[in-house]
Image (tube, grey):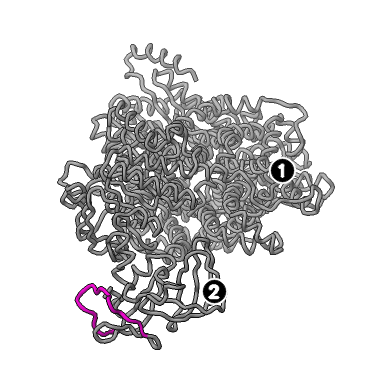
Amino acid sequence: MTNVTVKDLTLEFGAVRVLDKLNLEIEEGEFLVLLGASGCGKSTLLNCIAGLLDITDGEIHIGGRNVTWEEPSERGIGMVFQSYALYPQMTVEGNLSFGLKNAKVPKPEIAERVARAAEILQIEPLLKRKPAALSGGQRQRVAIGRALVRDVDVFLFDEPLSNLDAKLRADLRVELKLLHQRLQNTMIYVTHDQVEAMTLADRIAIMRGGVVQQIASPAEVYNRPSNKYVAGFIGSPTINFFEGDIAEGGVEFATADTKMPLTGYEASQGALSARPAWLGIRPESVITGTDVDTQPFTTEITVELFEAMGADTLVYTTLAGTPFRFRMSGQARVAAGDTLRIGFDPAQGSLFDKTTEERL
Amino acid sequence: MNFMKATTAGIAFCAAGAVSAADLEVTHWWTSGGEAAAVAEFAKALDATGHTWIDGAIAGSGGTARPIIISRIIGGDPMHATQLNHGRQAEELIEAGLLLDITDVAEAQGWKDIINPSSLLDSCTVDGKIYCAPVNIHSWQWIWLSHKAYEDAGVPVPSNWDEYVASAAALEAAGKIPLAMGQQAWQSSGAFGVINVAVGGVELWNKINVEKDAEAAGGAEMAKVFEAAAAARAMAANSNVQDWNQATNLVITGQAGAQIMGDWAQGEFQVAGQVAGEDYTCLPGLGVNEVISTGGDAFYFPKQGDADIEAAQKELAALLVSPEVQVNFNLKKGSLPVRGDIDLSSANDCMKKGLEILAAGNILLSGDQVLSADTSGQIEDLMVEFWNDPSYSAADAQAKYAEIIGDAD
Amino acid sequence: MAVTDSGGTESARTPAKKPNRLFKNLTAKLASVPMILTAIVVFIGCTGWTIYHSFTKSRLLPAPDKWVGLDQYERLWSTRRWLVSIENLAIYGICSLVLSLVIGFTLAALLDRKIRGESVFRTIFLYPFALSFIVTGLVWQWVLNPDFGIQSVVQRWGWESFTFDPLNNADIVIYGILIAGIWQGSGFIMVIMLAGLRGIDEDIWKATRVEGIPVWKTYIVVIIPMMRPVFVTALVLIAAGIIKVYDLVVAQTSGGPGISSEVPAKYVIEKMFQSQNLGQGFAASTMMLVSVLVVLIPWAYLEFGGKRRD
Amino acid sequence: MTDATANKGVTPRGAKPRRRLSPTNIMLYGTLFVASVYYLLPLYVMIVTSLKGMPEIRLGNVFSPPVEVTFEPWVKAWAEACTGINCDGLSRGFWNSVQILVPSVVISIAIASVNGYALSLWKFKGSEVFFTILIFGAFIPYQVMIYPIVILLREAGDVLSAMTGTKIRLMGSVWGLVIVHTIFGMPILTLLFRNYFASVPEELFKAARVDGAGFWGIYFRIMLPMALPIFVVAMILQVTGIWNDFLFGVIFTKPETYPMTVQLNNIVNSVQGVKEYNVNMAATLLTGLVPLIIYFASGKLFVRGIAAGAVKG
């Protein structure tokens, strides 16, 4: 059973079309992350699902019900915001119970639900405090708690961790994951942070310009990005692109001066045909050292710059006339000017049409 | 005021067949010492009938009060009676049916026969119906001279305008202001009117103000009037008070030699305990043309749509013109009564002079009776500028004046 | 209290259908009824009514059928008192705009220098704003009284020839009113400026200090440009007040000496009610409105015309 | 939100002056001192004049302190000064002013705050247009509208009378004046509230909607408690504005309901012989007392409130 369905959703602000005939199906219990750069329409989409924005056209179904024109509070959703959006004049307890009071839930039940949420989130000692007296992490817990007490099937998160510092963010990320495992609710989570997306999501929907570019599991998105934009957006450091031509029969990718074998490439549709294209190679898929020669493509490069990050080392160089980055595991001993032999399998990379930029 | 007592008294009077007691709110702009004392006479008389006088005094001259009075009548919240200078000011209100017709009161009381001069009643009459009760006659044509100032200056008190002009230098030499003038527009305009009648004569005045003869207004006769006004302006140069009674006060205290002001100034002398002929002298028509204008104050009764109140309003109308109230009120106010059949032997010298002129029929319509408020306003604007700006030449002012008269309706 | 009230979209309707636009945000619309009525009936309706009647020969009562075209305007512009009023308003307006801004900003900047007794000074500068124009006019009339006030005091100190008698001198009377007007209103501008100064990031001050820019130059080159919105707010408040100057003049000079301190608002009131020439008063008030629009429309265009998108 | 605004407007941000008696400091305090003299002089004059007898006023200058302190003028101004034949001073006007003030302030702020709230958070088609008209309205000279409003009030009174079956007069009643104050206070107050509510984080509003609060629920439970600083500003502005109003008071009331300013004008202009400057000054001070006390007492809140939202925009 599908829990949240978005059909042909269109949203216009005056003459500007922000969302264009967008379709989305989210399974019950699924953790879906809406990922994209700022301004891509991901928060807007979430606000539409929440009912905070009136859509121009299309339908939204939650739990099998058409909720397109229902009030946010009637849709069976809970929402957590980036700025926490706690009511400053109410205590934590007041914040948690505000929605329930509005829904005229009986008092004993309110108390019970608040207690349960506080227990789950371990914020019981904070119940009598005002938001101003809480730390950022505590505030976000309360904000999550506010969604929790509503006892709803769908949770909406609007960049909930963006205002926290790096360490707290990592901690809360794990907690959110645990929470999802425990509650098994449907969660729709908006973020621009791909690490959050990769770690939390069952599926990731990558958005750009009001259109979903790809919706798939994190691994799929990472390994088989559906177009050049997704490929470039996912992964850090970013993927390397070569500009060139696919040879007849799809056996080879040729840049101006380099030829790379494509044997074994799994094309999306049928066989590869000759055409101008981009080849994307992830920095992680480059091999150095003794195993180089096992790779279908090997070459020698000169190290231009390197960044030692502790766990691994990032090397900057130029390959086939374009800047090229790759990652070496461990604390590799390299220096600028060194010559290195590297290898990778171009067939494990991604090919995109030169003009449409769609995956081939 | 003790409302409780008044109400109790009212109950007693009800038994005598009076209509049921009503609170009557009366607006007026009589707030100076003499004026307030005079109004109190009305209030006393009304309270004695069992009704209650609710005083709605508005300070700061008719200019401040009229907007308030009119906007309340138009806005549907009329007072029960209000002072207005009768004449053309109320015309439109009557036409719009906002004022109460009191013809029956006038007939019952025989106003036609007793009101003197009859022009006062004419001003209250529109299409044969009477809408207001005149309460007094006010004439502008007076100059008030301070004996003390002349004593200090060592010259005799003049007996006409020319002598007065001649004495100005002596007054100035003694550190006196020759002519006290308040700076409000209506005072400037009024003083000019007085000089106009005195210097130019009644005929000229009528030609200009009644017939609206612009040629006469721009003519040589009138030029003399403007010259005289310019001379008066020079004499008043050092007088920088605002209100008319402050100017009167300069005369009372001997700081100024004289003031051109209507007969209401007399009330101030009276309040200050001064005696006509001993402490001050009054010259009607500036001692040149002994006439008085017969403008005055009248009370109008806005429609209320309530029979009881209407009856009370009519009772008040009758009361205002009744002999006893007329005597008491006008003695305090320093104005002349509107009926010729009452004994004013207790009046002072100045009032008696006025009564004589009135009896002799040397009368003149008042500006309010012949000019629309709009034209009066334009003349006021012109005069206040003329009196206060020494660089404004008499010829220029006259040209503008002729223009206004030419446009008047 | 209807806490379950849902901003107008009642839950009873069939959810699949798009609701009527008219009923969207119904509660918000209902709550805005007083504002809508005020905007349409009072500000548009009454203004329109007044403009219409300025073309009629209305006397004491409005006479919509006595159409006289531009007669009232012709007379208005040939009336010296009106011309003097306009001139006075221009002088008063420009001076009070400039002086209020300069004095308000200067005082605010001084108070912002971490001085001792800031709240005392602030209260001193602000308190006149609590007083009405009537009170302001009366007090300054008294202070400027040549026989008792500043002039006589200075003369008693030995400066026999000192004359400062603005209220009785037709040429400078408007400045006498200006002194009082500035006294009353500049404190409020100071508070607004102070609020604006406090809103400026402290890092800006650190940066200019590091770069060695003198304090006065920092104010002019850095701070004032940053406070643009604050200046606009102040400007709007001052300008809205200027056109309405009436009470102050009535209390302080009654337009005198002569007609030298007349202002348009006073002309309007007196023509309407005193001279019983509504048409003339309406024509004058329409001209006031026109002059406001002449100033306001270009400003509004500059201010809002550029960013119409959101 | 609250913690962000709490400190705003209290701490000076300018560079710190260094030494006590540096030339800069002398300039600084010197200028402030001179300015203070200008601002304080009239208050001083009012106070000393109101404590002198008339003979002393005629002899001395306005700045000399009273030789013989007398409270007679105050008593007279409050309870005895005459207008016409009513000699009860300002006391009657005081209570009238209070009766006008309280409903006017409450209603005008209530309506303007709801307007500002609707305009910033519940925009609907055309709402901006009405707001623009409203702001233009702030610049329309009152004179343009007085006369039609007189007629409107009369008509509205008639309509109400017909609807309720009892005679209701808006013109000349306190309620008519309340309506007028509400109308003319609306532009600036609405602007004030709109700017303030626009600065409230939008997410808070969204969270409340998800929590099922409607238009009024959010207004009363969320926004109102947060908007206290701006309510203080609005209240101070309205209290002083309405208390000090003369024009509307004189046109839309009648003698029994005259506010204090109109009575003040009446007393000051009812000259009985000589101008009693001491009584006038005492009356002036008495009239200004209420707004003065409010400013002296809540000046800090006022400045803070202005800083918290009024200047944005």
Is label 2 in a helix, a strand or a loop? strand
Residues behind callouts 2 and 1 on a single chain: no
Give the quarter of the image for residue D155: top left
Depth check: B387 or D306 in front?
D306
- Where are the magenta residues, as a range? A259-275
Q: Is residue D270 above or below residue B346?
A: below
Left or right of A5 on screen, residue C104: right
Depth check: C38 or B10 in front?
C38
Q: Amino acid at mark 2?
A: Leu
Q: Is residue D189 above or below residue B42?
A: below
> What's the mark number on residue C116?
1
> What's the mark number on residue D45?
none
Q: Residues within 10 Å of mark 1 (few under 14, many from 20)?
A: few
Q: Is residue B171 visible?
A: yes
* Horizontal and vertical percent position of residue A291: 42, 72
Q: Is residue B135 visible?
A: no
